[in-house]
C-alpha cells in the first residue's frame, strides 16, 4: 500500500493518544503516511506528527467554531478530487472522528468499516478485525470495491510507538464553502474538573455499577481510585441514571480501557461492558451474585457486598 | 415543525444474536421490535414537537418483510404517522446504502428536524445519521445530551471528551441523542388503540426511485472474510467474602506490585 491518511485529532495536550496509535499502525501498512488536522495549532503538531511517521500534514485550518465533521470531510474530499488519492483513510472512533468519517463516506461515495479493532495487510487489501458478541467472536472484513477504504478505529487497538522521523511538512488544505452543512457552531465549551489520570490512560481503573445502590456510594469508587493512583470508571447503567457523567463510561458506547488492573464493583458484566475492559491485564470483580457474568473474566472474584468489601479495602490501603 | 425520527427495528436483544452461516450477517429473520436506543429519539421528538405549535412527528424505518411492530410501539407513544421502506433487494445493506434509502424516504417527508440515536443496539456503526445529514445537505449535531428548539434554531449540549459543548445551528438539521437524555414514556392503552389506525406508508425501492444495484448486498462493496472465536479469558479464583474479601484483594494487588 502506497499511501494512508490518518485523521489527526488534538486537544489541549496535543495529539490524542488514539491519533498516535493510528499513525503508528499506518506506518506498518503503507510506505507513506499523511495526516489531516484542523484548528489553529497544526504547525505546532508537525514535529510530533513527524515523529510518529507522518511525512506531511494537510491543515484544514481554523474552523471558526464550526463542528469539524462537515468542513474537515469537505477538505479531504477536495484533496481527493484534486488528485491526492490515499489507499486508505484511518479515523479515530471519537465524537468528531465519526462525524468526519460519515460525511467523507458520502462525499467519496465509499462505504466504511467502523468499530475496527485490528487492521492488517492481506493479499493486497486491508483486513479488519471487529469484536462482536461482547468480544467472544472476531469478524474479519474487507472492502471489495474501489478505494480509498474508510476505517473508523477504536482506541487501544494498536500500540503508539514513535518512529523518530523529522517534522511533517505542513500543507494548507482549506475546506472551502460547505454551505448549510457547516452551520453547526460551538458557542460555549464546558470542561469538567478532572483530577488524577485519564480513564483511557490510567494504569489502574476502578469502576462502579448499579450494585452501588446510589449515586452517593460512587464516592467509594473515587476514593479507591485515588488510593490506587487510578481513574474512576462506570457502567452505562449508572451513567444513564445520572449518577456520573458520560465521560466515565466504559464499554461499547463508552471508553475502551486496557489498564494493568481493572476493578469492577457492583457491575454485572453485560457484553457491552465486557467489550470495553476485557483487554485489561488483570481484573478484580466484587459482586454479590456468584452467577454474575463479570466473574467469567475476573482473575480474582470476590462474592460479596460492595458496601462491606470496599470500605474495608479503603481502610486497609489507607493504613499501609 | 415537522420532526422525523429514525426508528430501527431489530431482533429482540435479550435473545442471543446469531450470524447467518451463509452471509455472516446478523440473522434478522425473527420478529423485530423498536430498538430501545430509538425510544429516546421518539420521546425527544414528542417533547420538542409539543413545544412548537402545529408540529407533527413522522417515523422513518427501513426493515425487512414489511415489519411494522416497532413502528406501532412508537406510534402508540404519540407519533403522528410512519414511513416504512421494505424491499427484498435491501437485504445486506451497509450503513451508506441504508442512509441513501432513509434519505430518499425523508425527502418525501420534508423534515425540519431529524432525530436518530447515536448508535443502534445491533449494528452500532454510529455513522448512519451523519451520512444521512450529508445526503440531505443538513448540519448535524451528534451525541446530544440536551436538545431544545423554537422551530427555527436548534440548541444542543453535545458530549465531549471532558465535558460538553453548547452547539447551535439553524433548522433543518440532524441530531443524534444518547440514552438517558429523556425518559421514554410507556404507551398508554389509549395510545396503543389509537396507533392501530395511524397511517403507515409502506414504500418499495421503486417508489423511492432508487436502483437495486446501489443498495443491499449489491451496493455494499464490503464483505466479511470470516468469523473466528476470540481467545477466551479464563476465569481465575473466586472467593466468597467472609470478612476477608478486602484482604484477598490487597494480597492480589501486592502480587501485581500495584501497592
Ligand atoms: C447499544 C447498547 C450499548 C451499551 N453500551 C454499554 C457500555 O458502553 N458500557 C456499559 O457498561 N454498558 C453498556 N450497555 C448496557 C449494558 O447492557 C448493561 O445494561 C449495563 O452494563 C449494566 O450495568 P451494571 O452492571 O452497572 O448494572 P446491572 O446489570 O444492573 O448489574 C448490577 C450488578 O450489581 C450487583 N450488585 C447489586 N447489589 C450489590 C451489592 N450490594 N454488592 C455487590 N454487588 C451488587 C448485582 O448482582 C448485579 O450483577 C449498553 C447497552 C446497549 C443496548
Ligand atoms: N434501518 C434503519 N431504519 C431506521 N433508522 C435506522 C436504521 N438503521 C439505523 N438507523 C438510525 O441510525 C442510528 C445509528 O445506526 P447505526 O449506524 O446502525 O449505529 C440508529 O440508532 C437509528 O436511529
Image: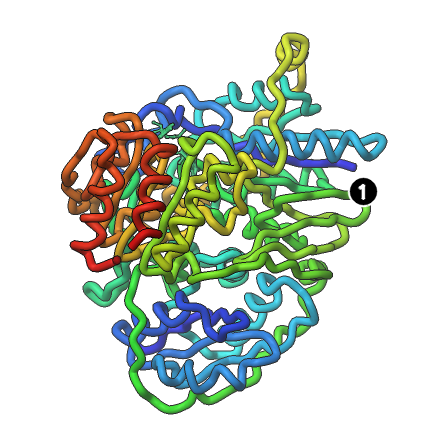
Q: Residues within 10 Å of mark 1 (few under 14, many from 20)?
A: many
Q: Which residue is the extreme one toward the right?
A: B53
Where does ligand 1 appear, by image quarter? top left
Question: What residue is rendered at 37% in x and 40% in y?
Answer: A311
Across and down, in percent, residue A297 comes to 22, 40
Q: How many marks?
A: 1
Which chain does tag 1 point to? B
Across and down, in percent, residue A111 comes to 43, 55
User: Tell me, what colour scheme is on the image?
Assistant: rainbow
Q: Is residue A301 left or right of residue B17?
A: left
Reading the image, the residue beneath label 1 is B151
Across and down, in percent, residue A189 comes to 66, 61
Element class at badge 1: loop
Residue B176: name its quadrant.
top right
Residue A54: name its quadrant.
bottom left
Image quadrant holding the C terminus of chain A, namely bottom left
Residue B20: name its quadrant.
top left
Judge whether B114 appears above or below B162 on screen. above
Q: Can residue A49 be seen in this view?
A: yes
Q: Is residue B15 left or right of residue A8?
A: left
Q: Can residue B94 be seen in this view?
A: no
Q: Is residue B87 left or right of residue B229?
A: right
Judge whether A100 appears above or below A137 on screen. below
Name the residue nearer the viewer: A195 or B4.
A195
Across and down, in percent, residue B29 comes to 35, 24
Judge whether B18 appears above or below A122 on screen. above
Question: What residue is rendered at 41% in x and 61% in y?
Answer: A150
Mark 1 Cβ and ligand 2 under 8 Å apart: no
Q: Which residue is the extreme one toward the bottom?
A: A166
Amino acid at each position: 500500500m502506497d499511501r494512508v491518511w490518518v485523521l489527526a485529532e488534538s486537544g489541549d495536550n496535543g495529539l490524542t493518544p488514539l491519533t498516535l496509535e493510528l499513525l503508528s499502525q499506518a506506518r506498518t501498512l503503507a510506505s507513506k503516511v499523511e495526516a489531516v488536522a484542523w484548528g489553529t495549532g497544526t504547525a505546532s503538531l508537525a514535529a510530533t506528527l513527524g515523529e510518529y511517521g507522518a511525512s506531511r500534514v494537510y491543515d484544514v485550518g481554523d474552523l471558526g467554531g464550526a463542528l469539524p465533521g462537515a468542513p474537515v470531510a469537505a477538505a479531504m474530499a477536495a484533496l481527493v478530487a484534486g488528485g491526492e488519492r490515499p489507499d486508505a483513510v484511518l479515523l479515530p472512533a471519537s465524537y468528531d472522528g465519526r462525524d468526519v468519517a460519515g460525511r467523507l463516506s458520502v462525499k467519496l461515495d465509499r462505504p466504511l468499516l467502523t468499530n475496527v479493532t485490528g487492521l492488517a495487510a492481506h493479499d493486497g487489501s486491508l483486513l479488519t478485525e471487529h469484536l462482536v458478541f461482547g468480544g467472544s467472536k472476531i469478524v474479519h472484513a474487507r472492502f471489495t470495491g474501489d478505494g480509498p477504504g474508510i476505517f473508523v478505529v477504536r482506541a487501544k487497538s494498536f500500540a503508539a510507538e514513535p518512529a523518530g522521523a523529522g517534522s511533517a511538512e505542513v500543507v494548507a488544505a482549506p475546506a472551502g464553502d460547505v454551505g448549510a452543512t457547516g452551520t453547526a457552531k460551538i458557542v460555549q465549551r464546558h470542561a469538567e474538573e478532572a483530577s488524577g489520570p485519564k480513564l483511557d490512560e490510567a494504569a489502574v481503573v476502578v469502576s462502579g455499577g448499579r450494585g452501588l445502590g446510589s449515586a452517593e456510594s460512587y464516592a467509594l469508587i473515587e476514593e479507591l481510585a485515588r488510593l490506587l493512583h487510578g481513574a474512576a470508571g462506570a457502567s452505562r447503567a449508572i451513567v444513564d441514571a445520572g449518577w456520573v457523567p458520560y465521560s466515565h463510561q466504559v464499554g461499547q458506547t463508552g471508553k475502551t480501557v486496557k489498564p494493568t488492573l481493572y476493578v469492577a464493583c457492583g457491575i454485572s458484566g453485560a457484553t457491552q461492558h465486557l467489550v470495553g475492559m476485557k483487554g485489561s491485564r488483570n481484573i478484580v470483580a466484587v459482586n454479590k451474585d456468584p452467577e454474575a457474568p463479570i466473574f467469567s473474566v475476573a482473575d480474582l472474584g470476590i462474592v460479596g457486598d460492595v458496601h462491606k468489601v470496599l470500605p474495608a479495602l479503603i481502610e486497609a490501603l489507607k493504613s499501609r | 415543525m415537522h420532526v422525523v425520527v429514525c426508528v430501527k427495528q431489530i431482533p429482540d436483544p435479550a435473545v442471543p444474536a446469531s450470524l447467518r452461516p451463509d452471509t455472516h450477517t446478523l440473522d434478522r429473520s425473527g420478529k423485530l421490535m423498536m430498538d430501545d436506543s430509538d425510544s429516546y429519539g421518539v420521546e425527544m421528538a414528542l417533547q420538542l414537537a409539543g413545544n412548537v405549535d402545529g408540529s407533527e412527528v413522522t417515523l422513518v424505518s427501513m426493515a425487512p418483510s414489511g415489519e411494522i411492530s416497532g413502528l406501532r410501539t412508537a406510534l402508540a407513544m404519540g407519533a403522528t404517522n410512519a414511513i416504512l421502506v421494505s424491499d427484498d433487494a435491501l437485504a445486506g445493506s451497509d450503513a451508506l446504502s441504508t442512509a441513501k434509502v432513509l434519505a430518499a424516504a425523508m425527502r418525501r417527508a420534508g423534515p425540519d428536524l431529524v432525530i436518530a440515536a447515536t448508535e443502534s443496539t445491533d449494528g452500532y456503526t454510529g455513522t448512519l445519521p451523519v451520512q444521512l445529514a450529508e445526503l440531505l445537505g443538513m448540519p448535524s449535531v451528534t451525541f446530544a445530551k440536551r436538545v431544545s428548539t423554537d422551530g427555527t434554531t436548534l440548541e444542543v449540549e453535545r458530549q465531549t471528551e471532558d465535558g460538553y459543548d453548547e452547539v447551535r445551528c439553524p433548522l433543518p438539521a440532524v441530531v443524534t441523542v444518547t440514552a438517558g437524555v429523556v425518559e421514554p414514556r410507556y404507551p398508554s392503552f389509549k395510545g396503543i388503540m389509537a396507533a392501530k389506525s395511524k397511517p403507515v406508508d409502506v414504500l418499495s425501492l421503486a417508489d423511492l426511485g432508487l436502483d437495486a444495484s446501489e443498495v443491499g448486498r449489491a451496493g455494499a462493496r464490503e464483505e466479511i472474510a470470516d468469523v473466528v472465536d476470540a481467545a477466551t479469558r479464563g476465569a481465575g479464583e473466586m472467593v466468597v467474602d467472609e470478612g476477608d474479601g478486602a484482604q484477598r484483594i490487597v494480597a492480589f494487588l501486592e502480587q501485581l506490585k500495584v501497592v
